[in-house]
Amino acid sequence: MAQTTTTPPKTSLFFTPEIIVGKTQEANTDFPKTKLQKNVFLSIGQYNYNSNKEWAARLNYPKTGISLGYTDFGNSTKVGHAYSILPFIEFSILKKQLNGLNLQIGFGSSYMDTQYDIITNAFNRAITTKINWSFRSFFYYDVFKTHATDWRFGLGYLHHSNGHTNLPNQGLNSFTASVSAKIDKNSNSNNDFKKPTFASKSQTYMAFRLGLGQNVLSEKFNTKKEVFTVSASAGKILNNTFKFGGGFYYRFYEHYYDYIKNNEALIEEQFPHFKDNPYGYATSFGIFASSELLIDHIGFEFDLGLNIHKPFYKIDWQLNQGFTYENANGETIEVLGELDWYYEIKRTISARMGLKYYLWTTNKAPKHNIFLGAHINANLGQADFTELSCGYVYRFNLKEKSI
């Protein structure tokens, strides 16, 4: 029987070459026809069996790493290829019921070599920018193992879109299957690691954030302009791993302000009073609840909020949910989006998801910390703007009790 130890294994790295096939879903009506989608990924990861990593122990020692990928969407001329880089985290799930089942989630960026063009590629309304957000979610099952290799079968979902920095932005979605081999000659040494015991603890925190975002207003107003944001929040950090809180945000949309100042059509026809205070009507503020997973220097964050004030969204919705057509006389007719119940939900609910990089590792629970962030902000599930941010976190005294 192997002797248990709290000393980490000699090496914690593994490599996973992976072949993925699937189908690129149609992003819009008359989307270009695609053949079988083909992907090649190489993942470089590490185990986190370390007695000093509390977050790893709390999460039952997930694997982390980075995936590099090439995607052929099945139509080289009209849809093209993607070159992706995605940090990932992988959890063992249902271990007692189905040993060998894992869930991997990756979030990063991709370079796309083919975009929408109104003249040469008008029916691919999925991608309009070279640089895009990328997301992948896969279930893996270890089919069989050798001394150095775990052979795996996977089922998953891939997504690419630009976060509303150019329109159209329908995004590319794919459902896929994969075969991969996780290669690690020293993986068996992980079985000798004995989990350390950590005391249960919590800390109160306060945080402040400044952000600079970019978006476009509509296909007609399709030039990127800035969104300026500021927020303050407070809450609890549990066991130095799970961060929960709430706060207040304020945003100023340059596109909204310019539309009002230029007295565009809907201002003149429906909202002339916006001209009395263009700055105020170009702003948004609200409250939000925040959740974050702290992993050393990295934070995975998801926020859900309520817009208390976002008056210009009435115009935003009408422009983006409407359409144009030519009548029998050859005149272009514009039909505005209807302010229905779905509009009310989208106007009210905001969401925010992304990554943070902390200057000092969160594993040591520093009283002061500074972070940089990259996030997608959304109206419910529809992208609103892409944001880069920086912020400061202050932790109050630690409260600890034995378990």
Image: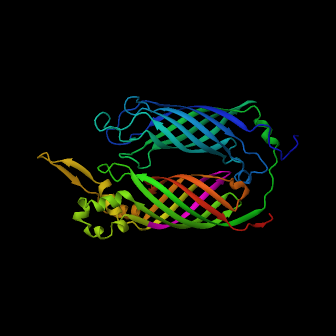
Residue 41 against residue 132 in the figure, above or below? above
In-front residue for pair 153/197: 197
In-front residue for pair 299/14: 299
Q: Residue at x 37, y 51 (%)?
A: 216
- The spot of residue 52 in percent (x, y) is 77, 51
- The spot of residue 252 in percent (x, y) is 41, 62
Q: Is residue 281 magenta?
A: no
Is the C terminus in the top left, top right, bottom left or bottom right quadrant?
A: bottom right
Q: Residue at x 35, y 38 (%)?
A: 116
Q: Is residue 237 visible?
A: yes
Q: Residue at x 37, y 64 (%)?
A: 282
Corner quadrant of residue 291: bottom right
Q: Is residue 286 magenta?
A: yes
- Report the number of numbered marks: 0
Which segment is the magenta one? 285-300
Corner quadrant of residue 123: top left
The colour scheme of the drawn protein is rainbow
Residue 101 against residue 72 in the figure, above or below? below
Horizontal relation, residue 351 to residue 63: left or right: left
Q: Is residue 380 visible?
A: no
Is the N terminus in the top left, top right, bottom left or bottom right quadrant?
A: top right
Horizontal relation, residue 206 to residue 161: left or right: right
In-front residue for pair 277/330: 277
Give the main secondary structure of the magenta stretch: strand
Horizontal relation, residue 334 to residue 353: left or right: left
- The spot of residue 7 in percent (x, y) is 83, 44
Q: Residue at x 32, y 35 (%)?
A: 121
Residue 184 against residue 197 in the figure, above or below? above
- The spot of residue 63 in percent (x, y) is 68, 43
